[in-house]
Amino acid sequence: MWIDKYACEALNLYEELRDSLTDDEIASFRKHCSMVELSDLFEWTSKNLQSVHAYVEATPSQRKRKKIWQDPQVKPLLVWAACIYARQGFAVLQALKESGLPGLQGIGYRSMTAEAGRAYIYVREHEEPEWPFPGPSPFEPE
Protein backbone atom coordinates (compact mmCIF):
# COMPACT_ATOMS: atom_id res chain seq x y z
CA MET A 1 0.00 0.00 0.00
CA TRP A 2 1.27 3.53 -0.80
CA ILE A 3 1.04 4.63 2.84
CA ASP A 4 3.71 2.08 3.86
CA LYS A 5 6.36 3.88 1.83
CA TYR A 6 5.49 7.27 3.31
CA ALA A 7 5.55 5.88 6.86
CA CYS A 8 8.93 4.25 6.26
CA GLU A 9 10.38 7.42 4.75
CA ALA A 10 8.98 9.52 7.62
CA LEU A 11 10.82 7.32 10.09
CA ASN A 12 14.01 7.62 8.01
CA LEU A 13 13.63 11.41 7.99
CA TYR A 14 13.18 11.45 11.77
CA GLU A 15 16.42 9.46 12.15
CA GLU A 16 18.22 11.81 9.75
CA LEU A 17 17.13 14.80 11.82
CA ARG A 18 17.95 13.12 15.14
CA ASP A 19 21.43 12.20 13.92
CA SER A 20 22.18 15.67 12.56
CA LEU A 21 23.43 17.06 15.89
CA THR A 22 26.93 16.35 17.16
CA ASP A 23 27.49 14.83 20.59
CA ASP A 24 28.67 18.26 21.81
CA GLU A 25 25.52 19.96 20.48
CA ILE A 26 23.35 17.36 22.18
CA ALA A 27 25.22 17.72 25.48
CA SER A 28 24.93 21.51 25.36
CA PHE A 29 21.23 21.33 24.47
CA ARG A 30 20.61 18.77 27.24
CA LYS A 31 22.16 21.22 29.73
CA HIS A 32 20.00 24.05 28.37
CA CYS A 33 16.87 21.89 28.61
CA SER A 34 17.58 21.02 32.23
CA MET A 35 17.28 24.72 33.05
CA VAL A 36 13.99 25.44 31.26
CA GLU A 37 10.48 24.09 31.39
CA LEU A 38 9.37 21.69 28.71
CA SER A 39 6.34 23.92 28.19
CA ASP A 40 8.71 26.75 27.19
CA LEU A 41 10.19 24.56 24.46
CA PHE A 42 6.75 23.64 23.17
CA GLU A 43 5.77 27.33 23.22
CA TRP A 44 8.87 28.16 21.15
CA THR A 45 7.86 25.39 18.74
CA SER A 46 4.35 26.80 18.40
CA LYS A 47 5.67 30.28 17.69
CA ASN A 48 8.16 28.93 15.13
CA LEU A 49 6.02 26.23 13.53
CA GLN A 50 6.56 27.57 10.00
CA SER A 51 10.33 27.29 10.46
CA VAL A 52 10.01 23.82 11.97
CA HIS A 53 7.85 22.72 9.04
CA ALA A 54 10.31 24.20 6.53
CA TYR A 55 13.24 22.55 8.31
CA VAL A 56 11.59 19.12 8.14
CA GLU A 57 10.78 19.66 4.46
CA ALA A 58 14.30 20.82 3.56
CA THR A 59 17.08 18.57 2.32
CA PRO A 60 20.28 18.36 4.40
CA SER A 61 22.09 20.63 1.93
CA GLN A 62 19.27 23.20 2.07
CA ARG A 63 19.44 23.14 5.87
CA LYS A 64 23.18 23.81 5.80
CA ARG A 65 22.76 26.81 3.46
CA LYS A 66 20.23 28.63 5.64
CA LYS A 67 22.33 30.76 8.00
CA ILE A 68 19.79 31.11 10.83
CA TRP A 69 19.37 27.33 10.95
CA GLN A 70 23.09 26.99 11.67
CA ASP A 71 23.08 29.48 14.57
CA PRO A 72 24.34 27.54 17.63
CA GLN A 73 21.51 29.00 19.74
CA VAL A 74 18.81 28.03 17.23
CA LYS A 75 19.96 24.81 15.59
CA PRO A 76 19.57 22.37 18.53
CA LEU A 77 16.14 23.73 19.41
CA LEU A 78 15.05 23.62 15.79
CA VAL A 79 16.34 20.06 15.35
CA TRP A 80 14.61 18.98 18.57
CA ALA A 81 11.30 20.49 17.40
CA ALA A 82 11.77 19.00 13.91
CA CYS A 83 12.37 15.55 15.40
CA ILE A 84 9.15 15.72 17.36
CA TYR A 85 7.29 17.08 14.32
CA ALA A 86 8.65 14.28 12.10
CA ARG A 87 7.78 11.60 14.68
CA GLN A 88 4.28 13.01 14.93
CA GLY A 89 4.00 12.83 11.14
CA PHE A 90 5.22 9.24 11.26
CA ALA A 91 2.63 8.42 13.96
CA VAL A 92 -0.19 9.79 11.79
CA LEU A 93 1.01 7.85 8.74
CA GLN A 94 1.41 4.71 10.83
CA ALA A 95 -2.09 5.19 12.27
CA LEU A 96 -3.50 5.50 8.76
CA LYS A 97 -1.65 2.36 7.75
CA GLU A 98 -2.85 0.42 10.80
CA SER A 99 -6.45 1.60 10.43
CA GLY A 100 -6.70 0.84 6.75
CA LEU A 101 -8.33 4.24 6.14
CA PRO A 102 -6.58 4.88 2.80
CA GLY A 103 -8.24 1.78 1.34
CA LEU A 104 -11.73 2.53 2.64
CA GLN A 105 -13.05 4.70 -0.18
CA GLY A 106 -16.75 4.50 -0.74
CA ILE A 107 -17.76 3.51 2.80
CA GLY A 108 -20.42 5.41 4.72
CA TYR A 109 -19.55 8.50 6.72
CA ARG A 110 -20.42 6.79 10.00
CA SER A 111 -18.00 3.97 9.34
CA MET A 112 -15.33 6.39 8.14
CA THR A 113 -15.79 8.50 11.27
CA ALA A 114 -15.48 5.41 13.47
CA GLU A 115 -12.32 4.29 11.66
CA ALA A 116 -10.84 7.79 11.90
CA GLY A 117 -11.53 7.70 15.65
CA ARG A 118 -9.62 4.43 15.85
CA ALA A 119 -6.70 6.04 14.01
CA TYR A 120 -6.72 8.96 16.44
CA ILE A 121 -6.59 6.56 19.40
CA TYR A 122 -3.58 4.88 17.80
CA VAL A 123 -1.79 8.23 17.52
CA ARG A 124 -2.64 9.19 21.09
CA GLU A 125 -1.50 5.84 22.47
CA HIS A 126 1.79 6.06 20.60
CA GLU A 127 2.81 9.46 21.90
CA GLU A 128 6.42 10.22 21.22
CA PRO A 129 9.04 10.98 23.87
CA GLU A 130 10.13 14.57 24.35
CA TRP A 131 13.86 13.69 24.14
CA PRO A 132 14.72 12.07 20.78
CA PHE A 133 18.50 12.08 21.25
CA PRO A 134 20.81 9.46 22.76
CA GLY A 135 21.44 9.64 26.48
CA PRO A 136 19.25 10.54 29.42
CA SER A 137 16.39 12.96 29.00
CA PRO A 138 16.73 16.28 30.80
CA PHE A 139 12.96 16.21 31.32
CA GLU A 140 12.92 13.01 33.40
CA PRO A 141 13.31 13.38 37.17
CA GLU A 142 16.51 11.76 38.38
Image (spheres, grey):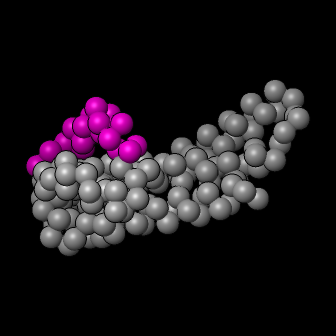
Which image quadrant is residue 23 in? bottom left
Q: List x then y, in percent, for residue 135.
A: 26, 70
Question: Residue 123: where, in percent of width, then height?
Answer: 57, 46
Q: Name the residue: 15% across, 53% down.
A: 71
Q: Is residue 24 left or right of residue 125?
A: left
Looking at the image, which residue is at 24% across and 37% down? 44
Q: Please provide the residue range marked out in magenta.
A: 35-54
Rendering quarter of residue 15: bottom left
Relative image position of residue 83 (x, y in whole percent): 38, 55
- Where is the N terminus found, in terms of image quarters? bottom right
Pick whichever, 95 or 20, lies toward us: 20
Quadrant placement of the C terminus: bottom left
In this picture, residue 67 sits left or right of residue 4 = left
Task: Answer yes or no: is residue 140 visible.
Answer: no
Q: Is residue 78 visible?
A: yes
Foreground residue among 63 and 33: 63
Q: Is residue 13 left or right of residue 103?
A: left
Q: Would you say residue 93 sits in the magenta stretch?
A: no
Residue at image x 88%, y 35%? 106
Magenta residues, dominant SS class: helix
Q: Residue furthest top?
A: 109
Residue displayed at 61% across by 57% down = 6
Q: Which of these two is toward me, 10 or 139?
A: 10
- Number of residue marks: 0
Up/down of 11 relative to 112, above or below: below
Q: Position of residue 35 (x, y in %)?
A: 11, 49
In the image, 31: left or right of 137?
A: left
User: Would residue 39 be counted in the magenta stretch?
Assistant: yes
